[in-house]
Amino acid sequence: MRITTLIGLVAGLASQTVNAACSAPLKIDDFSKQSSNQNSLGEWTSDDGSMSSISASAGVLSFKPKAGSYFYETFACQAASTNGYNSVSFQMKGPAGGSATLEIQTKTSCSATTYTSKYVSITGLTGNTQTINIPLSQFSGANANAVTGFVWAGFSSTTATWQMSNIAFGCGSSAGGSTSVSATKGATTTTSARSTMSTVATPTASAAPGSCSPLLIDDWISQSRLTFLYYNAMGYPTSDDASMTSITVGKPATNRVEFVPKANSYFYSQFPCVDAKKNKYTGISLRIKAPKGATLALQLDSSDSCDATNPKSTYASSTDLGWTFDGTEKLYTIPFSKFAGLNTEKLTTILFSGFTGTTSFGPMAFYCGNSGEYVVPPTSADPGASATVPAPSNPSATALVIDKFANANTNAMGNWHGGDEGMTLKYASNKLTITSPDADYAFYTQVSAGCSDFTKYKGSYLHIAYTGTTAFTVAFQQHNSQCKAEIAPYPETWDSAEASRYAKNGHIYIPINHFNIELSRVVGFALKGFHTTESVTLSVIEIVSSVPAGTTIPKKDETGNLVFACKRPNSFAFAIDDGQPDLAQEVLKIIREEDVKVTFFTVGAPLLDASTNLTNVYKEMMAAGHQLALHSFTHPKMEGLPDYASIDWEYNEDVKAMKSQFNGYTSTYFRPPFGNEGARMRSRLTKAVGNTASIVNWSVDVEDWLWAETDTPEQQKVAFQRDVDKGGNLVVLHYLYPSTVSYLREFIQIAKATGKQLMRVDQCMMDPNAPPL
């Protein structure tokens, strides 16, 4: 496993060389402005709602922490060393024998956009108020000439009430300006190794007393949960640390994962400090398919302190366990009794290594008794609308041939047709064969170079003759109100239909009135959202006035509202997707200072991981008047998922996570990860949150995904200005990258300069349930 180093230092009272540049301590916080989250330097201070309780009175901050609680002070970058400040001092009252951790955040220079963290351990608390003075030199590797914040965390007691007061940069021996009471015997330095694996706040996992049923570790239900977010079904870290050639969920079957290893590949999964003894678990079971003669090495970790990064490791081989592989899938058990020295009361991690060839796992779980298998419960996904509707003819309109694929550049109407780069298009004998490796790609065929009025075809049908797959979406696109391609957004929107619902015997018939768009200004059709790599061959796309006798037409699926722009006149909205938790406070600071309200689209799974602190961050954002909305549970390409059950799982788990973390709150606004949209994900969204669902894409893209980590991150500003100049008014950006966050203030100021009013997405959509402007 990859190892990083966390420096832990014991704070003490030590004499320091004094720089004569300062004459008195620099007060950071006397807690006189705590009610407004302002410190004595006029900057933000908060616990992000992480404490059980917190309040300030008479200059003293009192708080009762929870596991994972913290409190921080931010301020403008301080060149502390140059200005003679050589320590940080504060008064603290904690339980006798208690401890805490202090983090310093520093940059390479005050102009840098990122900071690094170094830590000291505060020990030897007596139960009385003590003045603690920590020399900045004790934060090994920190830059005392570019200090931006302090964070107190790691409180040893969650039952005691702690107190802090008089936080200041110390000037020479004056430190905090009060008599110092030693909190430790002296300054000593210790170093502890920590794995990249991290634990979340839940300390143990247990079943009801006296009962025992299998405890699921992972059911391999989601590719993005496993290889994008790195969570197992317990919500705990799991990964191969990029040691495999590939990891594929759903292969060779549902609820399976396939590993294609390299030399020295490994794979691990963590647990919430499982007490197997109390809960009567005797081992872990899973189905495995491995080549004949293959072997595996297993490692089980336990930790007396429930710290997965400080484990006691025990080992066994597949031979030790009596396993043999023959190329077929079988159930295998991992009895804890085979691992000498394992603390079965505090299990933290399982790790597999020594792979010899392509190997697949089935559901992995703790079992009871001598053996056991976790059986994934069957899904009961709604199969979708099955009712049919009448198919009357449309005598007011004649047939219109749109495309017969005679050449690669234009369709039968003389308008452009073509596909996205990455899609394979083969024209031959007046037919087109489309093969798409990704649900993002589309083939387009236009009915006009500008706007076309299809009102007369409202009672007609789109007919597509095909052979091959029907695992794709058919979209009918609507132009913007000015009918200009250089105006954003273009297209303005579209509605989508699932091809397979309308397909039979090589023909697809979709009523034009099943596309809920403005028919007076249409652009053309798109075949998109392919969720298979199988090909489809097309011979004609046309509008017909009637369908053959005996043809059945399914009822239209609800598809919600696909939006790329605000509907309220003269409005502009920032819609911000998830990012790095350690950048969230800077985002909040900027939007607070710029006095704007925004919308945050959040992924569900990280909300359940207390170590991310995202729930507390978003609670603070909501309390400040910002909107919170849905962004899937694990961030997959929604239309690329294999079936309804997979799509439903994403929505249902996302809604469940949001409700559990925000007192029953949910939203009808959804931003599709990667902007990936199609008929299935739209219809299933309406089933999850209601027919008023909004699928929120964008007309202003800062292109952080393209530029943020390059040598020219300023191109993000160019992209933002370009789209604003086109009339775009609905933004997508992520607080994933420091450079993006550093430009956020400029983005907001550019938007303000348009004269438009900045607001939340629900407000800019004129949602009657949105708060008033």
Image: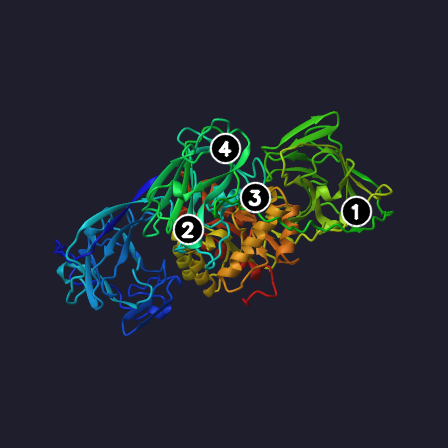
Mark 1 element type:
strand
Residue 348 in the image, given as x and y percentages of width and height? 39, 48
Residue picked out by circle 4: 359
Residue 722 in the image, given as x and y percentages of width and height? 52, 45
Residue 336 in the image, given as x and y percentages of width and height? 40, 44
Residue picked out by circle 2: 276
Left or right of residue 25: residue 767: right
Inspect this view and state whether residue 487 appears: no
- Which amino acid is tagged 3? Lys
**Where, quadrant-wise, is the C terminus in this rendering?**
bottom right
Residue picked out by circle 3: 637
- Which amino acid is tagged 4? Thr
- Which amino acid is tagged 1? Ile
Density class for disc 1 (Cα within 10 Å; few <14, some 14-19, many ≥20) is: many
- Please report whichever mark, 4 or 3, sits nearer to the chain's N-terminal start: 4
Q: Whole-Å distance between the Cαs marked 4 and 2?
A: 27 Å
Above or below for 528 versus 404: below
Mark 4 element type:
strand
Mark 3 element type:
loop
Q: Whole-Å distance between the Cαs marked 2 and 1?
A: 56 Å
- Please report whichever mark, 2 or 1, sits nearer to the chain's N-terminal start: 2
Which colour style is shown? rainbow
Above or below for 188 versus 97: above
Density class for disc 4 (Cα within 10 Å; few <14, some 14-19, many ≥20) is: many
Density class for disc 3 (Cα within 10 Å; few <14, some 14-19, many ≥20) is: many
Report the number of numbered marks: 4
**Where, quadrant-wise, is the N terminus in this rendering?**
top left
